[in-house]
Image (spheres, rainbow, N blue to C red):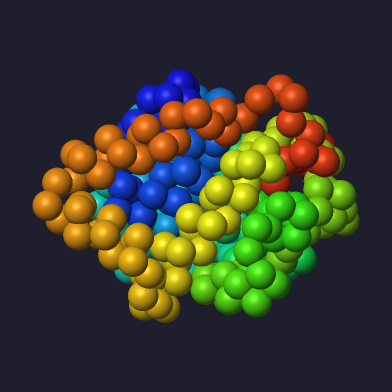
Amino acid sequence: MDKQKILSDMIQLYSIAPSIAFCRVPEIYYLSQININGKTVLDHCCGDGFISQYTFDGAKISAGVDINSTSVASAGQRQIYGRLEVCDASKTLPFEDESFDVVYNNSALEHIPNLSSTIKEAYRVTKRGGKFYFCVLGANFYFKFWPLSKHAMQEYCGYQPVHHVLSKSEWVNCFESAGFKIEGIQYYFNEMESAYLAKLDYLYSSYFIKRQFNPSVVINHLCYKLSPKYVASYWLKQFSSFNFTTDRLNEINSSGLYIAAAKN
């Protein structure tokens, strides 16, 4: 899938909260490379189902799970899932052992308190020869590249909240400890992009989640009400110079991780 098309589409949807659009570009770009044709697939922490519907162009997904009942109800309205369940992904998933060829999670693992049991459950329901794919912001985002104060970082981690701020090697260890074998790691968000996203997401998260006043966010909000197209064009111009993903990124100079883990 073309990154510029993803960017344009996401900005049209999320110009009122542009940091979400920024995050979605590399996530969807990588997830869209998963082959789900003819496979049993679990959308792990599916949310409202939009990411899967957009990424896989409305293809049928075997099942989706999420802890939020409102989100699951919204996902059901998309009519792409064979089965949807409201459940805590860190506890027993409502599926038999080795049910899925493909399990994927988009930037939700870091928000689940009990990571170890979550990964073990994902391993249980993944078939032999199957794969688990996930996107996550690593420790570089919160420590090495974080451009604001330590207090701001602590506030930010509490907004959603973020329970796991791990390096690449720590994420690898979590999955290998559960029995998975890491098959591939790709990277996104260089230092400049990471710092830009951190500032932007901190401002918009503090406004929408904690209702902390910020003039630039309020202006964007008011402009959006008057002319959504103008706001979308503004953010498209602001984001146009970013690459999001390149072959030159590695665990040292990036903050985002897209990891493929296999159950052999």
Give me the residue at 36% from left, 55% from top.
17
**Residue 208: quarter of image:** bottom left
Measured as percent of width and height from the top left, residue 175 is found at 80, 52
Q: How many marks?
A: 0
Please identify the quadrant where the C terminus is shown.
Answer: top right
Above or below, 107 against 13 in this view is below
243 left or right, relative to 14: right
Out of 152 and 46, give the one closest to the viewer.
152
Q: What residue occupies the far left of the structure in this picture?
A: 226
Q: Is residue 78 visible in this depiction of the protein?
A: yes
Measured as percent of width and height from the top left, residue 103 is found at 60, 44
Above or below, 115 against 226 in this view is below
196 left or right, relative to 66: right
40 left or right, relative to 92: left
Give me the residue at 20% from left, 52% from top.
224
206 left or right, relative to 208: right
Give me the residue at 28% from left, 55% from top.
220
Measured as percent of width and height from the top left, residue 194 is found at 62, 47
Q: Is residue 154 visible in this depiction of the protein?
A: no
Give me the residue at 52% from left, 70% from top.
160
Measured as percent of width and height from the top left, residue 165 is found at 73, 63
Q: What residue occupies the far front of the structure in this picture?
A: 215
Out of 138 and 95, give the one closest to the viewer.
138
Out of 23 and 122, give the one closest to the viewer.
23
